[in-house]
Amino acid sequence: MTDHGIMFAGAILGFGIALGGAAIGACVGDAVAGNAFLGGIARQPEAQGRMLPWLFAVIGLVEGMYFVTFGLGFVLLSQAH
Amino acid sequence: MIQLEANVGQPAIDLGCGTLCTFNYNSLISSALAVVVTLGIAFWFRSQLRDGEPGKVQAIFELGYDLLRGLIKSTVSEDALFIIPLALTLFIYILVANWIEFLPLGLVPALHGANADLNQTAAMAAVVIVVVEWYSIRVLGWRGFLRRFTRPFELPLPARIAFIPLNIIEEVTKPVTLSFRLFGNIFAGAAIIGLIVGLGTLSLPVGGTVPLTIVGSILLVVWKTFDVLFIGFIQAFIFMLLTVVYFGMAREGLEQEHH
C-alpha cells in the first residue's frame, strides 16, 4: 500500500461517491420537473406546446448540476497522479 | 482515450513563460473551426434575408429572434436590446461547436468538441459576467450596485449585513456554474464516446473484435444522436437563457420598476 496507491484509491472512491449523490439529485430534480409538467398538461392540454421548452430548460439546469459534479470530479481526479 | 494526466486530457504547448503561455492547441484549432463555421452560417443567413415575403430560413430565424426579444423585454427591460447580439452569438457559436462533434473526429486528431475544454467555457462565462456587472453598474449606479449585495431589501439594514457574504458567493457562483455546466456536459459526452469507441478493441473469445465493434458502432450512433444533437442544443439554449436571466437579476433594487 504505497502512498500513491492510497491517494489514487481515495480519489476514485471520492469520485464515485460524488457521482452517486449527483445522480440521486438529478433524478429527483427531473422527477419533480416532470411531475409539474404532467400536472400542467392535465389541467390545460392545449398549453403543452408552450410548456415543453420550459421543461427542457429546467431539465437542462438540473442535469447541469450533475455534469458540474462530473466535470469537477474529473478535474480533481486528474490531479491525483 | 481518457488520460488522467493534468489538463484533463488536452495536449498543450508551453510557449515558455509558464501557466499563462500554455495553449491547448487542440481546443484552439477546434474553436477556430467553430468560429469560421459560425461566421459562415451568419453570412449565409444574411444573404437569405429579403424584404417582403420571407423564405423558410428567414421565417425560422425571425421566430427565434422574436422569442429572444420577447424574453429580453419581459425579463430585463425595453432598453436592454443590446443583449440580443451577445445572446444570439453565444447560442449559435456553442451550438456549432457542440454539433461539430457529430462528425467522425477521430480521423483528425487535432479536432474535438471545442467546449470540452474548461478554458473555452470559462472564457465565455467571464465575458458574460463582466458585461452583466457593467450593465448592473450602468443601470443602478455605484451605490445601487453595492446596495444590491445587501439583498433581501425587506429586512432592516443591520440584519442585511449578514447577507453580504451570501450575495457575494452567489455572484461569484454564477460564472463558475455557467462554465462548469457547459464543460461538464460536453466533456462527459466526449468521454463516453471515447469509452464506446474503446469497446471495439475488446476481443471476445467467439469472433474476436468483430461483434463488439458492431455493437459499439450502433451504440455510438445512438449516443451521438442523443448527446451531441439533443444535449448540445439544450446546453446552448440554457447558456443563452441564463445570460438573459443574469441581466435581469442585475437590475434588482431599481425603485421605479413597473412591469
Image (cartoon, rainbow, N blue to C red):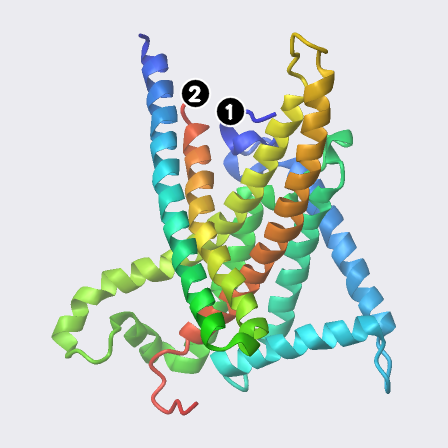
- Chain letter of the residue carrying label 2: A
Where residue A47 sits, quadrant-wise, is bottom right
Task: Classify B67 as above or below B162.
Answer: below
Residue type highlighted by circle 1: Glu
Per the image, the residue denoted by label 1 is: B5
Q: Quadrant of the C terminus of chain B?
A: bottom left
Q: Taking A9 as reference, is B15 above or below it?
A: below
Q: CB of mark 2 within 8 Å of CB of mark 1?
A: yes
Q: Secondary structure at mark 2?
A: loop
Residue B81 visible in the snapshot: no
Residue closest to the eye, A9 or B167: A9
* Disc 2: CA contacts within 10 A as few (<14), some (14-19) or many (>=20): few
State the residue at coordinates (48%, 57%): A59
Q: CA distance from mark 2 to mark 1?
A: 7 Å
Q: Position of residue B170 (x, y in %)?
A: 33, 60
- Give the residue at mark 2: A81
Amino acid type, mark 2: His
Residue B197 placement, left or right of B126: right
Residue B164, how many percent across, how many down? 24, 65
Question: Regarding mark 1 in the picture, which secondary structure is present there?
Answer: loop
Quarter of the image holding residue B29?
Answer: top right
Q: Closest to the observer: A52 or B78?
A: A52
Q: Residues within 10 Å of mark 1 (few under 14, many from 20)?
A: some
Q: Quadrant of the N terminus of chain B?
A: top right
Q: Position of residue A11 (x, y in %)?
A: 36, 25
x, y percent for residue B132 = 47, 69
